[in-house]
Amino acid sequence: MRKPPLNSNQPVLHLDDVSLGYGDFTVLRNISLTVLPGQVVAMMGGSGSGKTTLLRAATGQLMARHGTVTLFGQNLSHTDQSGLQSLRQRMGVLFQQGALFTDLNVFENVAFPLREHLKLSTKQLGQRVLEKLAAVGLRAAAHLKVAEISGGMARRVALARAVVLEPELVLYDEPFAGLDPISLGVTARLIRSLSDRLGCASVVITHDIAESFAIADEVYLVGQGELKAQGTPATLGASPDPYVQQFLRGDADGPVAFDYPVTPAFEAWLARTGIQ
Ligand SMILES: Nc1ncnc2c1ncn2[C@@H]1O[C@H](COP(=O)(O)OP(=O)(O)OP(=O)(O)O)[C@@H](O)[C@H]1O
Ligand SMILES: [Mg+2]
């Protein structure tokens, strides 16, 4: 078992008035967010609202344009590459396009972070890998090649790999995508139990309202370039805000925009094509 954090109230991840973007495009502004040890935080918002962008800020892949991102107590804009590397060893990430190594089998994919970071005996390593594969229901798929498993199975292998080091923080980008209802429930309970059992903090980006509300301590909703709402699942469920209610009910009409916004770059591209 890992030692408990020195100060269990110190946030694992903290964003303070953060703005993020690419080139001249600001995706999100004024975002403040706190993730405490052992918490499961759900991050919701429409497609293109900036959820994956937030995750990139948390891993230090994308620097904040304004405000501060603090990971394990360290301000990322004052952290060099080697500092970032050691912070990243304390976190697991399930990427939205969670690519597995296609030349390694299922077992070796999950074993990879262990071989990189820990010196375990063959037996200890094997047991840890099989335990994590068992947690996602794929112990008996350990020997299969990546080409021999389905899309949903690949997602679960990627999940086992993200948590195999039992990190202090795991960021999951759409962990439920492509899973059948049973795997989805098992995965959600796995995320919750990692937090309860190991004190690991989890940030879960998802569109699955029922499942994330069932496991989250705190829910954040982003849209229209900002934080639209934040609270416990119960508070958000009871919110009178039409934006929140439309999102939760999935209504087509209301303040939540479905269409990607028209930009000058799109207009210029369209004019060049001569289609219109
Ligand atoms: N590397 C990039 N360069 C330029 N723009 C980008 C880049 N990545 C994302 N964007 C833009 O940033 C916005 C937010 O994208 P992001 O991937 O964070 O959305 P998301 O909320 O994760 O969406 P989804 O639910 O579809 O995964 C989008 O408008 C997207 O076009
Ligand atoms: Mg995304």
Image (cartoon, grey):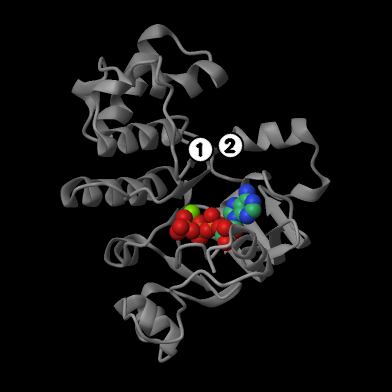
Q: Secondary structure at mark 1?
A: loop
On the image, which quarter does residue 24 sit in? bottom right
Question: In the image, what residue type sits under mark 1?
Answer: Pro
| Quarter of the image with the C terminus in it | bottom right
Image-based side of 213 in relation to 86, left or right: left
Q: Residues within 10 Å of mark 1 (few under 14, many from 20)?
A: many
Give me the residue at 35% from left, 80% from top: 237
User: From the viewer's perspective, is residue 41 above or below residue 86?
Assistant: below
Give me the residue at 56% from left, 21% from top: 117
Does residue 7 appear in this view? no
| Quarter of the image with the N terminus in it | top left
User: From the viewer's perspective, is residue 256 above or below residue 271?
Assistant: below
Closer to the camera in the image, 92 or 49: 49
The percent position of residue 56, horizontal first and vertical second, equals: 61, 49
Circles 2 and 1 in contact, beta carbons < 8 Å: yes
Identify the disc placed on residue 90: 2
Residue located farthest toward the front when viewing the structure as drawn: 274
The percent position of residue 142, horizontal first and vertical second, equals: 26, 19
User: From the viewer's perspective, is residue 66 above or below residue 194?
Assistant: below
Closer to the camera in the image, 138 or 180: 180
Residue located farthest toward the bottom when viewing the structure as drawn: 240
Give me the residue at 26% from left, 14% from top: 143
Closer to the camera in the image, 260 or 167: 260
User: From the viewer's perspective, is residue 88 above or below residue 106?
Assistant: below
The percent position of residue 104, horizontal first and vertical second, equals: 39, 15
Closer to the camera in the image, 20 or 168: 20
Image-based side of 18 in relation to 199, left or right: right
The percent position of residue 109, horizontal first and vertical second, equals: 40, 22
Give me the residue at 67% from left, 43% from top: 61
Label 1 sits on residue: 167
